[in-house]
Image: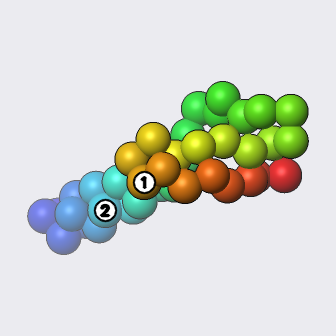
């Protein structure tokens, strides 16, 4: 049961890290505040 919980926790963390709430500009891009990178999703 502990292994299942650990696996689900890791999957949730990875999914949360990859998703974000938006805030895209007219080109579908935004700045990453942590790294300073600018990237696009569309």
Query: Which is more toward the observer, 15 or 29?
Result: 29
Q: How is the image coloured?
A: rainbow
- Residue located beneath label 2 in the image: 10
Residue at the image position 66 percent from the left and 41 percent from the top: 30
**Is the residue 25 above or below the residue 15 in the image?**
above
Q: How many marks?
A: 2
Which mark's residue is nearer the viewer, 1 or 2?
1
> Is disc 2 placed on a helix, strand or loop?
helix
Marks 1 and 2 close (CB-CB < 8 Å): no
Looking at the figure, which quarter contains the N terminus? bottom left
Residue at the image position 59 percent from the left and 43 percent from the top: 31
Query: Which is more toward the observer, 41 or 4?
Result: 41
Tag shown at residue 13? none
- Residue located beneath label 1 in the image: 35
Circle 1 crowding by C-alpha within 10 Å: few under 14, some 14–19, many from 20? few
> Is disc 1 placed on a helix, strand or loop?
loop
């Amino acid at each position: 049961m502990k292994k299942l919980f650990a696996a689900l926790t890791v999957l949730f963390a990875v999914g949360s890290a990859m998703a974000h709430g938006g805030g895209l500009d007219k080109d579908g891009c935004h700045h990453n505040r942590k790294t300073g990178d600018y990237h696009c999703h569309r």
